[in-house]
Amino acid sequence: MHLSKSKYCLLWQCPKLLWLEKNHPELKTEDASREDRMQVGNEVGDLAMGLFGDFVETTVLDAEGKPDIAAMLEKTRQCVADGVENICEAAFSYNGLYCAVDILRKENGGYAIYEVKSSTHEKEIYGVDIAYQKYVLEHCGITVTGTYLVCIDSDYVRGEELDIQGLFKVVDMTDWVDLEYPLVKNRLQVAEKTLSSETEPERDIGEHCSNPYDCAYWSYCSRHLPQPSVFDLYRLSEKRKFECYRKGMVSFSDMLADPKLNEKQLRQIDHYLNNRVAEIDKTAIRTFLDTLSYPIYFLDFETMQQAIPQYPGASPYAQIPFQYSLHYIEEPGGELKHKEFLAESGTDPRRAIAESLCRDIPMHVCVTAYNRGFECGRLNELALLFPDLATHLLNIRSNIQDLLVPFQSGAYYNRAMGGSFSIKSVLPALFPNDPALDYHNLEGVHNGGEAMTIFPKIKDMPPEEAAAARKNLLAYCKLDTYAMVKVWEALCEAVK
């Protein structure tokens, strides 16, 4: 058996997951953001290596750029023999079990394990991960004197220079590890049986499908579900979904017997089962439209979240706005106009975007956003950061109306929304055959996650590639506000 700590954690989540990963990886649904999360984790891990001072890293790559395990094992052995105080990526192998310890620190006559994560708090799975490492190390003759997690301190605020002592916090994982450690031997036996079997393990879907991580094989394992099912109901908790599932309440017809469903969930079921197209409350929509006045501005931000804050005053994972799109109409029947801003990648975008907002949006005008809390939050943060612009920025915030309201309130419901009120669901429901409003037809950037991933990379791209990336970002954000305009127009049309 060949088992790494990552595969051990797959086993902990679900033996079927481990088996599928070995035998049928083609069945997984690819997660487009997985590679970016891994890159963030690598960046955090590289930075944390210096947390305790001088260190030796044992990573060795072969001619193909892959880890040379044999060389890493030998280099680690030599570091231990030489009494190196801090060994990073320390490699150990025992009876087919392999692990690389992020930081192995010499302490109290032995070595302590420090597992580095880009998370901001401890989790049960981290204790599972570390317990496996402890098992391997102890069977390699290492005395493990402590087990710790190194993670991001969400309260850290960067000054002019990055302080890694402030950025990271160390959490004693002894209690978590002690719970898992006695179970490791038995889990390894299960792993060996699972990996050697030619038959897929039998296990039904359950809460483990998203604990600790969303399983990439959910679509495969849930293929027996009717479409739609209880798992498609609007804002039904995961716990409640699985309670219903285990009682045999799976289809929308089954769910009619549930007395706990709210009005929105019942409406979703009713529209599907009775093939209703749309429900429109003209009075409620008029009431909402009366809160809007000309000139009308349609605003949308794009932001990035940096685990390692790059700019003074920023905290880990803070939402840093780097782009906005702004459509506006100055009078009834007036021309639709557009303005936009996109910062230079590699620079602090906050001052530039704040000044641009103040130039592009006059005070005391009606501004709309879709799910206004996000835009309001960013404007608040910019106002705190730049007191000289605060009056204007806060005036913009105080005049924002939310285009989400008519849909979330039920004033306008279309069966095609499927119970979701996000603009990515509302737009195709209202305009199902308009290619100009189809995000799939965009190049390079199709959603906010891709936007926040691509923007910081532009600074390292060749000029032609960077220009194309900027063009794609502008096109994506522009469609966001154009979509808002079309949604507003649909609301206006609905009350005629």
Image (cartoon, helix red, strand yellow):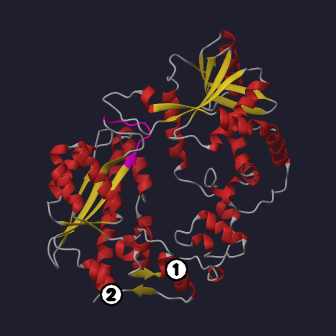
Binning the other alpha carbons within 10 Å of mark 1 as few (below 14), some (14 to 19) or many (20 upward) gives many
Residue at 61%, 69% in the rendered image? 231
The amino acid beneath tag 1 is Gln
Query: Relative to residue 150, is residue 482 depicted above or below?
Result: below
- Count of marks placed on residues: 2
* Res 432 seen here: no
Q: Residue furthest top?
A: 82
Query: Relative to residue 428, is residue 15 depicted above or below?
Result: above
Residue 306 belongs to the span the image colors magenta: yes
Residue 251 belongs to the span the image colors magenta: no
- The location of residue 133, given as percent across then percent down, is 70, 32
**Picture quarter containing residue 349?**
top left
For label 2, the SS is helix
For label 1, the SS is helix
Residue at 41%, 69% in the rendered image? 438
- The location of residue 74, given as percent across then percent down, is 70, 19
- The location of residue 155, given as percent across then percent down, is 41, 38
Of 125 and 30, nearer the camera is 125
**Picture quarter containing residue 279?**
bottom left
Residue range (magenta): 304-312
* Res 138 seen here: yes
C-beta proximity under 8 Å, tags 2 and 1: no
Q: Quadrant of the C terminus?
A: bottom left
Question: Which dot marks residue 268?
Answer: 1
The amino acid beneath tag 2 is Lys
Q: Which residue is mark 2?
A: 282
On screen, residue 327 versus residue 468, left or right, reads left
Query: Relative to residue 264, is residue 182 depicted above or below?
Result: above
Q: Main secondary structure of the magenta part?
A: loop
- The location of residue 297, given as percent across then percent down, is 22, 66
In whole angstroms, how far apart are the C-alphas of marks 2 and 1? Answer: 19 Å
